[in-house]
Amino acid sequence: MTTRDGLAEKHCAVSGIGQSDVGRRLGRDPLELTLDACYAAVADAGLTPADIDGLSTYPGGMAVPKGFTGASAYETLDAMRLEVNWFDSGVETSGQLGSVMKACMAIGAGMADHVLCFRSVWEGSAQGAGGRASLGPGGGQGGTIYAGDFQQWMLPFGSAGAPIWVALFAQAHMQRYGTTPEQLAQIALNARRNAGLNPKAIYRDPMTLEDYFNSRMITTPLRLFDCDVPCDGATAFVVSRRALAEDLAKPPVYIEAMGAALHDRPSWDQLRDLTRTVGADAAAQMWSRTTLTPADVDIAEIYDGFSYLTMLWLEALGLCGTGESGPFVEGGTRIALEGSLPLNTAGGQLSAGRLHGYGFFHEACVQLRGEGGARQVASRPKVAAVAAGGGNTCGCFLLSTES
Amino acid sequence: MTEPSTLVVLPVLTERNRHFWQGGAQGHLTFLRCQTCGYYLHPPIPVCPVDQSKDLKPEAVSGRATLASYSVNHHPWLPGFELPYVVALVEIPEQPALRLTTNLVNCPLDEIEIGMALRVVFRHFEDPGGDVWLPLFEPDGDRP
């Protein structure tokens, strides 16, 4: 353990946040969405593009899968005519928020003072023609396709992606701890309740438990409403050197701690414990870098690419006991806006759209600043736990209104 | 698996993985094993992570397994896969931490139980790039 001053994030605060329009299928140029978010974040901080001297993004340029990224680091650097002292992108990192951790490290290392971070997606438009729902040639065509790398261990058996991989974890959790489908449903119901108060959310109509159980079974125990909704949209932050952030336009959101650790195998099936698959190592590292404890957390903004991942993160972060996420969310009152631990206050990816990790970090800043409007947690939260990712790509943050 | 509408997904065979995907030709579930410490390497890699030995050879295991988890998939991700099908995670007794993602076959859905005893059964696919035997698992009637 190094001293507090030796921790990169202690030198950092979020000075600006920005988000583009968000929609199921906006049909807009993804670079335009990216730039809308980036310019908004810079302006929110009271800065201009000339002040930005660093850039970090997840995942950077990727042609496949289509829609997974709306702009590369190079495209954005060029489009904004940024003059940076440091920049980085990459998909092999500790979750989508790994890019924000790298920004903190760049500031801590003296490489930059104001780092623009962004995540941009257009999966809604890209998958509009049915791209996500099936793989292969489609249209009932026959033939043989070949799977290499890690997919060779999955695709020949029809284990066609994260919904199935996460379903296998969820089933193991239900078996070991008695977690029920009714408990799992609370993650989706809570998200929809909060989305109803978020004008930018994709799905805002009320959802009942009956609606949940009527939604199509995808792969047991996960139903359609346990899966997040692909969308178009971009989210950006300016992470600034703490001393500089305090003189900017908005009250800083301080980065209290972050966690990136991955001690298990980076795999979807060779894990030590099938019921402890998300974030436990990253969360332990995060708590080792702060004097705060899980009892200090006022709100939680936790990845819900699949509802079950949120439950796992609740356990990993120590917000409830191991194996106890089911009873913890039971009935939904504890995690509601008025509850003792408001969760996914903007509607999560399940109802507000798959902004892919960045949406949670954004919402944590909104809530800590008190800018949540109709969905603002009335008790004015001071500490937020933010976690993103699943499987072998996980990271988490603790954000605070106090330095 | 020969209907015209059937899509087949096969592994790309390489020198590193051939023993696994073609072990079924002899009816054997086969893993790369470290000859100095006995560790099974899966997925196969060129150096043992336990003792850094490069003395690695494919070896057959019993073909027995235990069901670690499962999911009954109802979504048509891949055309030609008959729905529903059961994706399973199985653990082998020779090294319980070694799991395979596979399919549970020949088992009524209401009889699936985590922890149940399974045995390997191979499905053979002819392919110009080299035949492949997918290791699937079914209930092991000889064991409780």
Image (tube, grey):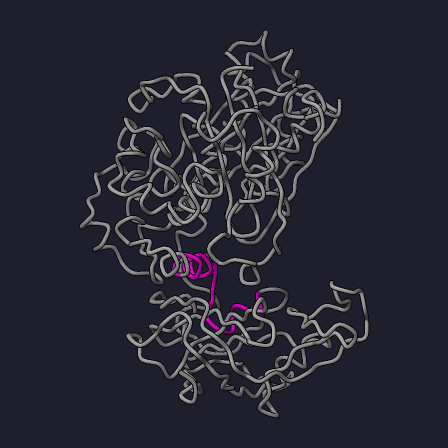
A290 or B25, which is in the foreground? A290
| Residue A299, horizontal then vertical, whole percent | 40, 28
Q: Residue A317: percent from the left, percent from the top?
A: 48, 38
Position of residue A294 in the picture relative to residue A55 (left or right)? left
The quarter of the image holding the N terminus of chain A is top right
Q: Position of residue A253 (x, y in %)?
A: 52, 19
Kindly tell me whether residue A124 is visible in this rendering. Answer: no
Identify the image quadrant of the C terminus of chain A: top right
Q: Looking at the image, is A126 positioned above or below residue A147? A: above
Q: Is A170 in the magenta?
A: yes
The residue drawn where x is 77% and y is 77% is B35
Q: Residue at x 64, y 85 (%)?
A: B60
Residue at image coords 49%, 86%: B121
- Residue drawn at x 33%, y 53% is A179
* A15 over A140 or under it: above or below: above
Residue A371 image position (x, y, % from top left): 39, 18
Q: Which residues are magenta?
A: A151-171
